[in-house]
């Protein structure tokens, strides 16, 4: 079963220095039916104005994946660690209790646009505090996984996250690890096909809940950039 979650249905915020779209309950936006999906807790697209910052804050024990779409970001924690990430890179923060983290748009004249994903972390697992990889110009790239396979970022959870780039008319098939997945269009229009149904196209910013499907095929109706988050747990 495929259930769309369109960009128009998502929560929104505009604080001047920050414009955001929230797939799940976050900040001032609250929907008791949308507190997350399996181990996926947050999926935000946010635009920070030139020079804007998120001030230091602590987090629950989650893995925070930032996919930088435009601009360059700087991240610091209260332990003195810092890293920069720019468009075309993905950064993973393995948050720790009692440690605060801040984020900054390093440009004084350009906006910073990124997707941010929070995944519940298994309490007994510990990974490197900071990990970063380049997003390749390929149809399918595994960018995060439980074991860091194929050069991916290593998560503290049983989740596989794919970055997808397709030309119009191209298609990709996936064998899912379990009963749940989430599809997010970043740019372009895509429709998903399973053995039971064919979903109408999802366009830029739209997402879809995928339930109880062992396999799924994605077909690009336009040039496409998307994420597929395989969430068996």
Image (spheres, grey):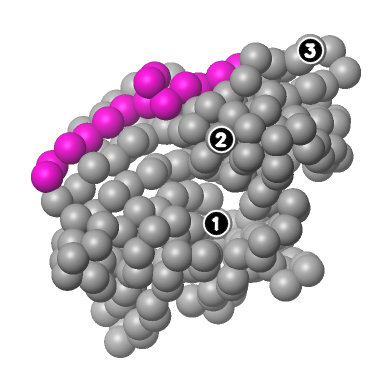
Front residue (pair 174, 39): 174
* Residue that extends furthest to the left in the rendered view of this protein: 16
Q: What segment is highlighted magenta in the picture?
A: 3-16
Mark 1: few/some/many CA within 10 Å (<14, 14-19, 20+): many
First in sequence: mark 3 vs mark 1: 1
Residue denoted by label 3: 197
First in sequence: mark 2 vs mark 3: 2
| Picture coordinates of residue 214, whole percent (x, y) | 85, 30
Residue denoted by label 1: 121
- Residue depicted at x 29% and y 50%: 47
| Image marks 2 and 3: residues in contact by CB distance under 8 Å | no
Residue denoted by label 2: 188
- Residue depicted at x 17% and y 70%: 108
Asked if 51 appears above or below 158 in the picture, the reply is: below
Q: Quarter holding the C terminus?
A: top right
* Residue that extends furthest to the bottom in the rendered view of this protein: 80
- Residue depicted at x 44% and y 56%: 69
């Amino acid at each position: 079963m495929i259930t769309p979650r369109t960009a128009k249905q998502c929560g929104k915020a505009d604080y001047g220095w920050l414009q955001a779209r929230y797939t799940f309950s976050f900040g001032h936006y609250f929907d008791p039916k949308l507190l997350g999906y399996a181990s996926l807790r947050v999926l935000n697209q946010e635009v920070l104005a030139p020079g804007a910052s998120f001030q230091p804050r602590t987090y629950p024990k989650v893995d925070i994946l930032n996919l930088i779409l435009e601009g360059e970001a700087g991240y610091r924690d209260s332990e003195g660690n810092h890293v920069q990430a720019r468009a075309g890179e993905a950064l993973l923060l393995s948050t720790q209790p009692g440690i605060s983290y801040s984020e900054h748009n390093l440009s004084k004249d350009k906006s910073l646009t990124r997707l941010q994903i929070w995944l519940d972390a298994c309490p007994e697992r510990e990974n490197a505090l900071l990990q970063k990889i380049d997003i390749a110009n390929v149809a399918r790239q595994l960018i995060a996984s439980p074991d860091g396979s194929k050069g991916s970022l290593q998560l503290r959870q049983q989740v596989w996250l794919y970055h997808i780039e397709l030309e119009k008319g191209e298609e990709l098939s996936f064998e899912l690890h379990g009963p749940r997945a989430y599809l997010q269009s970043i740019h372009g229009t895509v429709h998903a096909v399973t053995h039971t149904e064919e979903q109408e196209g999802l366009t830029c910013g739209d997402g879809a809940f995928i339930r109880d499907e062992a396999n799924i095929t994605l077909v690009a109706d336009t040039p496409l950039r998307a994420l597929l988050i395989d969430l068996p747990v």
